[in-house]
């Protein structure tokens, strides 16, 4: 897959937003300061992508925990029979 300039710019903006959020700063304000002149619609799209990625990681964690618990119960159940 070819990474475009647009993808690279979005990745830089999202990285800045994520770092700001980790530092308990406003992601949008941090991106505006780091990348002056970027249209708000682009910043909003990047923010949405960042939040969506966070949600995906959360669901993956939940699914791994559930899968792990199901496997442990299945093994325990099979061992007791």
Image (tube, rainbow, N blue to C red):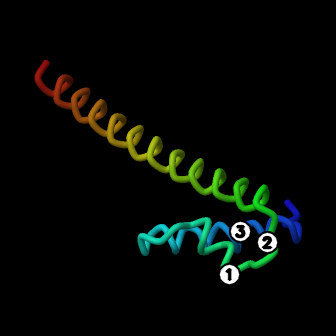
Tag 2 residue: 9
Q: Secondary structure at mark 1?
A: helix
Q: Nearer the viewer, mark 1 or mark 2?
A: 1
Measured as percent of width and height from the top left, residue 59 is found at 46, 41
Question: Label 2 near label 3: C-beta < 8 Å?
Answer: yes
Q: Is residue 79 left or right of residue 37?
A: left
Depth check, front residue: 36 or 73? 36
Crowd around label 2: few <14 · some 14–19 · many ≥20 (10 Å): few
N-terminal of the pair, mark 1 or mark 2, is: 2
Q: Residue at x 85, y 60 (%)?
A: 1
**Residue 21 versus residue 51 in the image, above or below:** below
Q: Is residue 37 above or below residue 72?
A: below
Q: Alpha carbon of mark 1 to alpha carbon of mark 2: how far?
A: 12 Å
Where residue 28 sits: x, y (%)? Answer: 61, 65
Q: Which mark is residue 34?
A: 1
Q: Nearer the viewer, residue 11 or 45?
A: 45
73, 5: nearer the viewer: 5
Q: Residue at x 30, y 33 (%)?
A: 71
Q: Which residue is mark 3?
A: 11
């Amino acid at each position: 897959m070819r990474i475009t300039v647009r993808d690279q710019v979005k990745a830089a903006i999202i990285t800045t937003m994520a770092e700001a959020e980790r530092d308990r700063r406003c992601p949008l304000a941090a991106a505006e300061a780091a990348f002056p002149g970027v249209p708000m619609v682009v910043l909003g799209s990047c923010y949405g992508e960042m939040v969506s990625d966070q949600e995906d990681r959360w669901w993956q964690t939940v699914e791994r925990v559930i899968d792990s618990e199901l496997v442990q119960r299945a093994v325990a159940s099979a061992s007791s029979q």
